[in-house]
Amino acid sequence: MVKVLLTTTSYQDTPGPHHDLLQSTGVEVHCERGPLSEKQMLELAGDFDAFLCGDDAITRAVLDKSLPKLKIIAKYGIGVDKIDVKSCTELGIPVTFCPGVNHTTVAEHTFGLMLGVFRHLLEQATEVRAGNWKRMTGHEIMGKTIGVIGLGRIGKEVVKRAKVFGMDVVGLDLYWPGEFAQEYDVKKAETFNEIFQTCDIISLHTNLTDETRDMIRAETIALMKPDAVIVNCARGELVNSNDMASALEAGRIGGYATDVLDQEPPAPDHPLLKAPNCLITPHIGSRTFESVERQAVMATQNLINLLNGKPALAQVNEVPGPEAMI
């Protein structure tokens, strides 16, 4: 019987048709509570024909130990930076993903975080629950200039909402969407520094690469307005946590709102947990019933297609799928 390792918790915890779809295959499913570290993956590797994974560390060492049994990696979600895709391609393991399923949800969460910081929602709600009627004065986001780094599906949805809120938008993307930018009056930034120096809000929606890792660090924070707010619904590693915490403590930056961290879940002594004007949510940007169902169904269908020797709905690497396994 085909054995599948399922690690994504939102898939497991959210009811929906994806459970029936996976069960209909007749495969044996083993569930773990991810995201799993490389050490945890190595303990499990070698016993499964397929991974239906989230943000687990699927390194070359994990892949080597998983062979020759492992035939498929079906990613639940979009980002594949935790998967050694280059090695997967070399080893002939197809990697599928789920584009176009969570852009609305993540864009909405971006504005939830943004408003939370500008209106001090967390602090004031906490005070009320404690029996205090402490009222703080916040700021509007109307009229602010937002820099959107990454104009893929999610970034574009953020732009649309920013215009409705009456914001000025500056964008940066390697592949500039000219028609979209013209339609929504998005000014093109030529460099990261242009956004850092001019924007009141910087919203991150780019992939994690060697070039973007630690793009927000002491040197770049020094270029920003002292009341600038950073919103991160992409990857925690885009921001240097120690530098951000130091800037918040020193009042060198207005605030940091993030759905992602460089370590998830964070250690008790993670520098951002006690930093002022820092709002953190536990990687739930795409965790709505609607989005989970879309992602889970697509990830499962990708898996089923490859198990049946058919093309996946969306695949990262150009590797032929295995012959029919079920």
Image: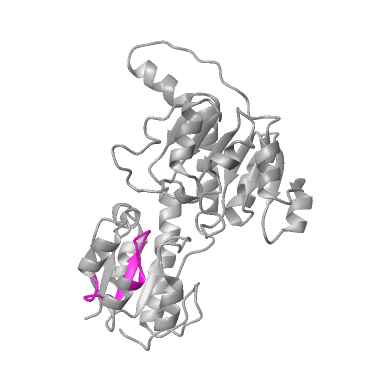
- Residue 178 left/right relative to 219: right
Q: Start and end of the magenta stretch?
A: 45-60
Q: Is residue 29 above or below residue 160?
A: below
User: Is residue 56 magenta-colored?
Assistant: yes
- Residue 200 left/right relative to 32: right
In percent of the image, x 34 and y 53: which residue is there? 10
Which of these two is toward me, 248 or 36? 248
User: Is residue 223 magenta-colored?
Assistant: no
Secondary structure mainly formed by the magenta segment:
loop
In percent of the image, x 40 and y 85: which residue is there? 309
Asked which quadrant contains residue 195, the reply is: top right
Give the position of the C terminus as an image quadrant. Answer: bottom left
- Residue 201, horizontal then vertical, whole percent: 62, 36
Residue that protrudes farthest toward the front in the picture? 219
In percent of the image, x 24 and y 72: which residue is there? 45
**Does the image show residue 149?**
yes
- Residue 100, horizontal then vertical, whole percent: 54, 60
